[in-house]
Image (spheres, grey):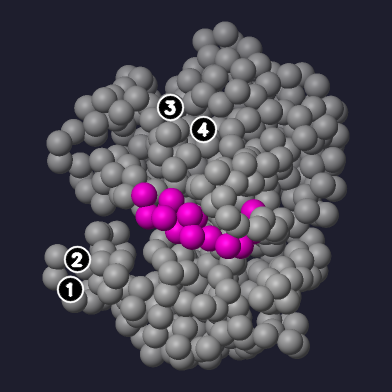
Amino acid sequence: MRILWFANTPCGAAEKLVPDQPRFGGWLKSLEEQLVQHNDIELFICFYWAEELEPFKYKKTTYYPMSKIRVDSGTDHSNDRALHCVHDDKKEVKKLLRVIDAVKPDLIHVHGTEDNFGLIQAYTETPVVISVQGILSSICEKYFSGVPSFVAYQCEGLHPEFPFQSVNFLYNDMKKRAVRERKILSQARYIIGRTDWDRRVTRLLAPHSRYFVGNEILRSSFYEKQWNKGELGDPPQIVTVVNRELYKGMETIVNTARILCENNTVNFKWTVVGQSESGNVAKIIKRWLKVDFKPFHIDLVGGKNETELGAILLNSDIYCQVSHIENSSNSLCEAMLIGMPVIASCAGGTDSILDNRKEGLLVQDGDPYSFAGAIVEMIRNSQKAIEYGKSARNTAMKRHDKECITNTIVAVYKNILSGR
């Protein structure tokens, strides 16, 4: 089978293009590494890159890097800023179709609905299956559920330091992408998902599609790591991974930590990976809540690579996911995979990922009192927390089993092709 992926990362090509930044590979790289081991699979991957490059083969995969086209000029731009501006879908789809013509795949696999790859469905007779990652229409509804929009805009100011990371840009860009996403899903014939949440939403937005279950392979090093503390630390170390979007719940961390400190309930330290105090979200929350992070034992350590994050998780005691909407957070899944005690917001697909009071604790998203209470519960019941972590690891090892997932994806491909 000749399989063509359209992906939002360079997958395994990251090793060649940015060898010093392995984060660009992501979980798709892990799936790619397994898939190319199948003798009956010939894999091609097309992805957007900051510059136009000739197709190349690296290891067992052939890659097609594509540059984006700006609407205002109609020309290619070879810088990162071009990847974050308004683009011409029609012209870009024509370039994508040329890749399809060159590869002549038996099946096309589009990873995610955030970009315009799925628009090719209307122009090709080759069967297309779409893997759902997040669903932008739902995320837009929850975007300002933690920090109200008027607060975000007011605290950010009229001229943010990094305009392409501003709330106004990110939210409006997401709304535009959500409109395109609904068009993509309305045309979809085959969907791969993994939670009750994405199944329900795609039954609404992609009513004519068949739904297949396909889990994700996580980053390789997390399969090898195991959290094996005999008891929680003193003070316990809490850790959360968040990104630059407001809906990820950074304000919940601050409010939860403040409640714990004001009630003098427990000692703790809270490490936040993916945020720095100079970041836009952190600045907005500091201005809004009129707080500094240090008095509440919150340490924003910025972005970390796979090795650094693994070390932080193994040295921490409780993983907290505070997002207001998720499908299946890879950060949460990685924490479960290494066997950490976990507390997570019951939002989106999280209740399909974590079994409450068996593999961790689920609490209402955005409710800092529930989070604070759950943290206290885990700290005061250390052995129970450790049992949660062990159970979570057993579940995650089965759910993210590399061979099982790869065989499932291959079976989906064959199923679709046999149904033509």
Q: Earlier in the sequence, mark 2 or mark 3?
A: 2
The label shown at residue 145 is 3
Q: Which residue is mark 1?
A: 74
Report the quarter where the N terminus lies: bottom right
Mark 1 or 3, closer to the camera = 1
Residue 189's place in the image compared with 193, above or below, is: below
SS at mark 2 in the image: loop
The amino acid on which the numbered mark 3 sits, given as a three-letter code, is Ser
- Give residue 95's position: percent from left, percent from top: 35, 80
The verdict on residue 192 being magenta is: yes
Are the residues flagged by discs 2 and 1 in contact, CB closer than 8 Å? Answer: yes
Stretch in magenta: 179-193
Instruction: From the viewer's perspective, tell me whether residue 17 is left or right of residue 411.
Output: left
The label shown at residue 71 is 2
- Mark 2 is surrounded, within 10 Å at the Cα level, by few (under 14), some (14 to 19) or many (20 or more) other residues, namely some
On the question of residue 19 being in view, the answer is no
Mark 1 or 4, closer to the camera = 1
